[in-house]
Amino acid sequence: MKRPLRAKPRLFFLLLLLLSVPVAHQIVSLPSQLRLVVGEEQQLSIRQPLAIFLLVADPIAGAPERTGWQQVSKVTPLRKGRTKLEVRLFGLIPVRQINVEVVPQLRVHVGGQAVGILISSHGVLVARIMPVETQEGREYPAKEAGILPGDIILAIDNQPIYQVEQVGKMVAQAGKGGRRARLDLERGGERLIRFLEPAISKQGQYLMGLEVEDPAAGVGTFTFFDAATGRYGALGHVITSTSSGGVFQISSGRIVPASIAAVEAGKRGKPGEKIGTFTTGSNTGLGTIDNNSQLGIYGRLFRAPNHAFYRNSFPVAMVHQVREGAAELLTVLDDEKVERFDVEVVKVERQRKPAVKGLVIKVTDPELLKRAGGIVQGMSGSPLIQDGKFIGAVTHVFVNDPTQGYGVLAEWMIQEAGLFSREELSQAS
């Protein structure tokens, strides 16, 4: 005689969990990774029937002789390291594990200065490859020469290239001379030489079959730097090609000081813009660009930009430390002067992994509204300060409401800059 099947207790509780929408929502909303700061108490907000248990060991408990799990409502990390938290249903059934990284309290210097962003110290960027319409049909001189989008043309026939206008003139000279043009390229940090035979278009022009653009990405805002390592972050979003929309694959680049000559105020449906100027001479550089990421541009400084609003460093806020409410924004509206303006954090996305648009901010400062209409292009990277902490940077403006915009959270920018491994960076610098 067969025994009747009995549901195991675990399956019973899991079924109960699935039927409880509020409990399920609570579990899903919990992060799988959490970064805490040494010495700072963290309240663990969770409602019954869920409870949080701590693996009792360094660095949080500070008692290596004690092992096992202990129910907790708050933790105060004592030293740098890694540990785990476990979420349990009815204190019995593990339903989620949270990996905890404990880091020292990082402090960085915030910026707000306007900077010119150059993808390469010289050369022009190959935006895309295209055919040349000739009397005989279509020809692809650039493709046949092995040139690819993203290549930087450094020189043509041993003549350094600094402006887009030079390219057409040098190609025409080669074509009229009945010879191939020598192109010195940079691709992924590697120097290459390619030989290209210009094609004659139906209009009688000598062309290479490619579109080039100036690698200067224009004016943005400097966000922060770390004095110990020289690492910095700026812009708060990725640099893309104006023609192809693709991400610039930066093999070399730098930031230089910039000055804001005027601000075109934003209006509903028409974003405003900072109008800035900067020089590209080799002796004007502030630092290199080695990472063009979705969260901004990053590199190492030669020297810190001038005209900082605050001279002292600020502690970096982790995602869970940022709140809705008053904050301040640092940016330049005139010349090189960094100014402070009031804003409000309207929404905080409790992101579990690095991503843009972690904040929604609203400009409340009458002076900024009067002079710029709110957030404008060129303000990307402007640092945000709240409760004496660096919490993030401006990234985008709402097209239909220039008084509001998005921001990226500081924790992700610091991570992208590599500063959670500050010791290794200091040894390598």
Image (spheres, rainbow, N blue to C red):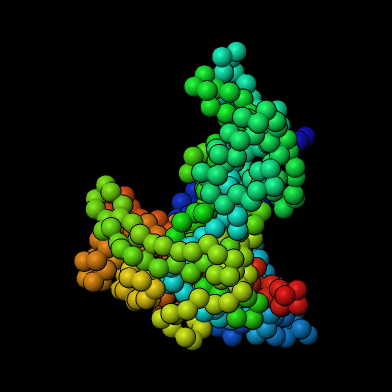
Please, is residue 70 above or below residue 119 in the view?
below
The x, y position of residue 257, in whole percent, is: 48, 69
Residue 385, above or below 369? below
Is residue 282 in sight in this rendering? yes
Question: The N terminus lies in which quarter of the figure?
Answer: top right
* Residue found at x 53% / y 27%: 205
Q: Which quadrant of the view contains residue 325?
A: bottom left
Along the line of sight, the residue nearer the viewer: 325 or 115? 115
Question: In screen coordinates, is 398 left or right of 194?
Answer: left
Where does the C terminus fall, quadrant-wise? bottom right
Residue 98, how many percent across, how many down?
A: 63, 64
| Furthest residue toward front | 177
Residue 8 locus on image (x, y percent): 67, 49
Q: Nearer the viewer, residue 121 or 167?
A: 167
Q: Is 25 left, or right, of 292 in this rendering?
A: left
Q: Is residue 406 visible?
A: no
Residue 267 vs 372, above or below: the answer is: above
Residue 404 is drawn in which quadrant? bottom left
Residue 118 shown left or right of residue 147 in the figure? left
Name the residue at 46% across, 56% down.
Answer: 218
Give x and y (percent) for residue 110: 48, 76
Q: Nearer the viewer, residue 289 or 208?
A: 208
Q: Residue at x 57, y 18 (%)?
A: 134
**Number of dots carrying numbers:** 0
Residue drawn at x 61%, y 29% as measured from the top left = 176
Q: Is residue 194 left or right of residue 352?
A: right
